[in-house]
Image (tube, coloured by chain):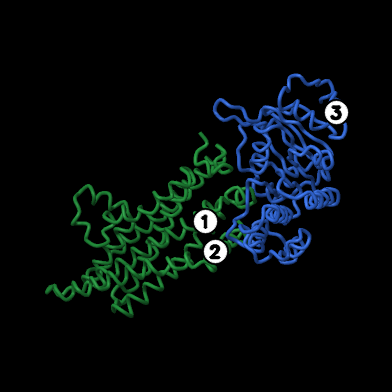
Amino acid sequence: MLQVAQSTEVLSVAGLRKRYRDTVAVDGISFAVARNEIVGLLGPNGAGKTTTINMVLGVLAPTAGSIQIEGVDLASHRSEALGCTNFAAVYAPLPGNLTVEQNLRIFGLIYRVKNLPERIATLLQRFDLERFRKVKYGVLSSGEQTRVALAKAMLNRPHLLLLDEPTVSLDPSVAREIREQIREYASQGPGGVLWTSHNMHEVEDVCHRVLFLSRGKILLEGNPKTLAREHGKQSLEELFITVAREPLALDLRHTL
Amino acid sequence: MSLTRTAAIVLRQFYLTRGSFSRVLPMFVWVGVDMVLWGFITRYLNAVTASGINFVPRLLGTVLLWDFFIRVMQGITMAFFEDVWSRNFLNFFATPLRIEEYVAGLVLSSIATSTVSLAVMLVLATMVFGLSFFVYGLLLLPFILVLFLCGIALGVFASGMVLRLGPATEWFVWPIPALLSPFAGVFYPLSTLPRWMQAMAHLLPQSYVFEAMRTVISGGTAPVAALAWAGSLAIVYVLVACWFFTRMYQYAVRTGLVARYSAETVS
């Protein structure tokens, strides 16, 4: 069995590119996620965020470049690399015809989680899902479904947690709790988090570092609390709008 | 290869089947209807023909084994369609699950469901219509094995086809056994067919099984070599089907179809 390296980087992406015929969706991007770090992957619709996440999840083959998760090459050791990864995304609902517990058990077996019944019980409690244990996933509200998806994403204590708009359908109170849990997971857990969101206040609150993607390239990178000022903007949201509408107008003197 | 991950696929199918009347019923109903229908047809034929031929093992026996082949194939495709219908590919294929573990899970699910169907057919055919499997002797085992392998091969191939062409193409899958049946010689000897159809029939392992059944019932020598050839051919088809499914999966990953499966095409 492949040994997982314990380096500071849980995710290392180098020269990643995806081309669909005449369209370049992701254009040679390189970045890393360090242990205990939450990195925000930001950008307008169509910037290449989901394409990047799909490539990191192994469900989309890159045209060029490499992805290493905990030092394990995804292309050549897919199963081992994905064994220490997990994700939650609004566009990937769990099977609605299985109960919450059945879903968690099946994915727990796929990730070969040790002491699975105890782990499921812990996660049901942590995400306030105990009363939905025997309820089919498909009949839950969108907020409850999001909490189940997050519980599934935490099943294997992933070293790399990918979250695509994890709080989009949650009310502000639950969203805050979830953010707190993910922050706690990142600070005390074994790995790092790659997070996409269109909520700039949330990003500023949660992420240690952000990457702005535009037209498949990383346009900006930095601390979400200072990045806007560094580029002459009042807020991260204003910076986001500029990236989305007129990326060439940006002052890029401070970028890497 | 992890047995735990394969077991997860089987467990998923168990959960879905256990709690669903609409999934349990087809395991019994279609095979039951076929047994009753062909049981009475064979009784009628026994009554109106003066040939002295017993049509029960000739027709009812072959229909039973043909239905078994169909149930094995559909056991795989139905388990696969559960992922199509619940848009679950992204969830499954973004995990450490290997493609061979997934396919093995589909095959094991099919073994479970087709065994139930086979048991129902055996009970009806033997208890109601007096079909005795002693007439086939020990050859019944290779008959079942070859048809089982054919069902696996066709089920995996059909699933690969749907993976490549999109959810709407599941309707291509259902008529495949009906398209094959004229060539397989389920109801008549291959010599009945024109030459070009006989040539096609020799590519189907099922045709050797049904020819062997008729030979044995007529008191002929068991065609062991032909059955061995049929078994080898079926194994080759299983390997080709697994290769095909893997290639279709690789195509889906290369083009992004796994992540956008409901779109049916990425072009």
> Chain letter of disc 1?
B
Give the number of callouts: 3
Amino acid type of the residue tagged 3 in the rendering: Gln
Assign a secondary structure to mark 3. Answer: loop
Residue B82, numbered circle: 1
Q: Is residue A188 above or below residue B164?
A: below
Amino acid type of the residue tagged 1 in the rendering: Glu
Residue tagged 2: B16
| Residue A158 drawn at (x, y percent) | 74, 51
Assign a secondary structure to mark 1. Answer: helix
Q: Quadrant of residue B73?
A: bottom left
Assign a secondary structure to mark 2. Answer: helix
Q: Residue at x 45, y 61 (%)?
A: B75
Apparent side of residue B145 relative to residue B21 in the rendered image (left or right): left
Chain given the colour green? B
Q: Residue at x 60, y 51 (%)?
A: B92
> Chain letter of disc 2?
B
Going from N to C along the chain, the mark reached first, 2 or 1, is: 2
Q: Are marks 2 and 1 in contact (CB under 8 Å)?
A: yes
| Residue A22 drawn at (x, y percent) | 56, 25
Colour that chain A carries in the picture: blue
Residue A234, numbered circle: 3
> Chain letter of disc 3?
A
For disc 2, the neighbor class at 10 Å (few under 14, some 14 to 19, many from 20) is some
